[in-house]
Every structure is written in C-alpha cells, then in structure tokens.
Amino acid sequence: MAELQGVEHGVAGPETAAFPPDRTQAILDAAKQVGGSVSDAFIAALLGGLRRYHDSHGQPVNELPIAMPVSLRQPDDPLGGNKFTGAMFAAPVALTDPRARICALGDIVAELREEPALDTFSVLAPVLNRTPSALAIGAGRLGGRADLSASNFRGQTRDSYLAGAKVERFYPFGPLPGVAVMATMISHVGMCCIGLNIDGAAVPDHDHLVDCFAEGLNEVLALSVSGGER
C-alpha cells in the first residue's frame, strides 16, 4: 500500500511519501503497461485522488485545470540542458479507469508539444525581465489559476552524503503558485519520493485529500501486476 505521511499541519501542510525500488519499478511498469510515461502515471494517480476527494464531498467534477511542465526537446536537439515550458489544461478527472487516464494524459501532452503557442513564455521572458516588477509578477500569475500543479524529475542515481551521513531520501516541496495543491516527485537512487504542498485555506481537510491521493497511487500501482491495454 502507498502511504502518505503528514509531517506538519497548518495553513499549508507538507506531506511526504516514498516508494522503495520495487514499488518504484511498479510505477514504471504501470506506465509501460498502457504505453504512457512515468509523468502520465504520476498525474493519473493524482487525478484519481482528486476524483475521490470531490466525490466524497458530493461535488463530482469531470475536469479540473492543472499545470505542469512539458518538455519541448526534439530528437535532433543537442545533448545537455533542459528545454521545457509550463502548460495548463483541463485534466480528465472523471475517468475512473486508471488506464484510460494515463492514455488520455499522454494524448493531451503529445498535442501540447505540437502547439506553437506553448513556447510563448520563452519569447516573453526577456521582455518581462525588463519590465517593472509589478507587471512581471502579474504576468507570472496568469497561469496560476489551476487547482493542481504537478511535476516530476530525475534525481540522484548514485549514493550521496551530507556531512558524512548518507542521504536516504530526498523530498521535493514546490511552492504554491496560486494553486491548491503542488505535487512533486523525484527519483533518488532507485526510490521515488513525493512531496505535497497543500494550501490549507483551499483544502481544510487535507488529511482526507492525502488519503485520497494514496488510493489513487495504489490504483495506478496495481496496473503493474494486473496488466493493461490501450
């Protein structure tokens, strides 16, 4: 079972979860079962949790706006460096089948990568850097109208040490850029670590939301043993 453990409760409550190598492999297998990416599987799990949360409050939703980084790298791009931009879209929350959610997310991201306007911010960034700070901040907040912001990235692949102590886990906590939930996953020497930053003003019962996210994760992880078809 995936278990999310709260480490602090307040206006914005950080929560953490970690999956050992065998469960991390299960995330990879679950994505491969339906031809999706690890990012697709991770976000599909989060959406499963959001669906459960809204249903439990008698407020079912079909879609929710979410924000996530999208890679713009092309096969012929030179090695090294990152090339990505932020994207916001209506995520398919109502899909109860985790396979369908993973596939739908993969299709959405593929379409976003082909959208010429997606890279607009990289064009505007040099201009925003020269504008008054108030205007730049206002422009940056235009994308902060999502309910969920999610990201995952590759971390250390080798053991690392801090002041002589081995780093066992690495929990990422992204900021809350005007969203209710910021979910981040990073791999660390074969283990996936998840950090949730939840706005307590938007989610007063965030313990319940965390339980819903755990159920969504278990649902996706189960695909690694049950198989799937696209």
Image (cartoon, rainbow, N blue to C red):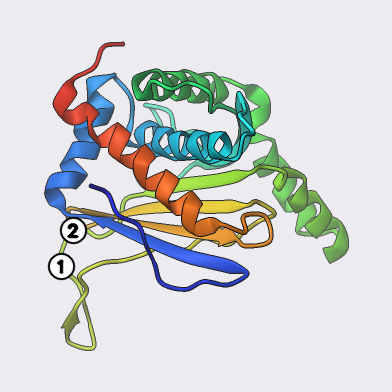
Point out the tag, 2 or 1, that comes first from the N-terminus: 1
Q: Is residue 130 visible?
A: yes
User: Badge 1, how many Cα within 10 Å: few under 14, some, many 20+?
Assistant: few
> Three-letter amino acid code at disc 1?
Asp
> Which of the pair 126/17 is nearer the observer?
17
The residue where tag 2 is placed is 189
Quadrant of the drawing holding the C terminus:
top left
Q: What residue is rendered at 86% in x and 63% in y?
A: 134
> Which of the pair 50/69 is nearer the observer?
50
Q: Position of residue 55 (x, y in %)?
A: 55, 33
80 to 78, vertically: above or below:
below
Q: What residue is rendered at 80% in x and 50% in y?
A: 139
Query: As drawn, is 42 to the left or to the right of 88?
Result: left
Secondary element type, mark 2: loop
Q: What residue is rendered at 19% in x and 72% in y?
A: 160
183 to 199, vertically: above or below:
above
215 to 21, vertically: above or below:
above
User: Badge 2, how many Cα within 10 Å: few under 14, some, many 20+?
Assistant: some
Secondary element type, mark 1: loop
183 to 173, vertically: above or below:
above
Q: Position of residue 136 (x, y in %)?
A: 80, 57
The residue where tag 1 is placed is 159
Q: What residue is rendered at 56% in x and 57% in y?
A: 205
Q: Is residue 132 visible?
A: no
